Amino acid sequence: MSLESDIKSMVESLDLKVYDITTVSEHDETIYRVNISSPNEGGVSMDQVVEVTKMISPLLDVTAPVRGDYRLEVSSPGIERKLKTLTHFECSLGEKVRLQTVDKEKYRGTVKSVEGDKITLTTDEGEETFSFKDIIKASTYFEW
């Protein structure tokens, strides 16, 4: 099993899901970022973030995710988040998204459905369906 699948299993044991795992460099510091989500209304609580951190930290002490020093950061992906996988779109059904296609066209709408690799948005002009491979950038957004 891989480190990411071990983390996923641990997180799922708490009735949560791994949204994304990334390694980033910020201000000369390496950050191993684990974003978790909850299927329940209200999202992820601070207690759940602390619980996941305490659960996976010993695993990372044994199997380091990166070479050298790093900082573990566990959080929820937030209300405005990048959509990088089909699962991210599935988790965003009914939410407002903006996306850009390979031909540089930009769209805004609400995720209506995800079927196979096809994503359908409801836009002001009607419904638009996109193949996942044709989307180069996408994120949810919140209107204040």
Image (cartoon, grey):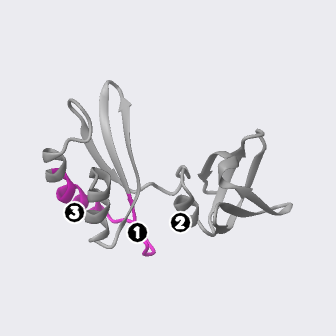
Q: Amino acid at mark 2?
A: Cys
For the residues labelled 3 and 1, the Cα–Cα distance comes to: 14 Å
**Residue 4, position as x, y percentages in the image:** 32, 53
The residue carrying pointer 1 sits among few (fewer than 14), some (14 to 19) or many (20 or more) residues within 10 Å by Cα, namely some
Task: Tell which circle, 2 or 3, labels the residue nearer the N-terminal end.
Answer: 3
> What amino acid is labelled 3 in the image?
Glu
On the rendered image, what quadrant is the N terminus found in? Answer: bottom left
Boundaries of the magenta span: 36-57
Residue under label 3: 51
Rounded to the nearest angstrom, the CA distance separating label 2 from label 1 is 10 Å
Which residue is denoted by mark 1 in the rendering? 38
The residue identified by callout 2 is 91
* Along the viewing direction, whichever of 126 and 142 lies nearer the viewer: 126
Q: Position of residue 19 (x, y in %)?
A: 43, 58
Whether 41 is among the magenta residues is: yes
What residue do we see at 73% from left, 54% from top?
108
Q: Callout 1: helix, strand or loop?
A: loop
The kind of secondary structure element at disc 3 is: helix
Specify the label residue 93 is tagged with. Answer: none
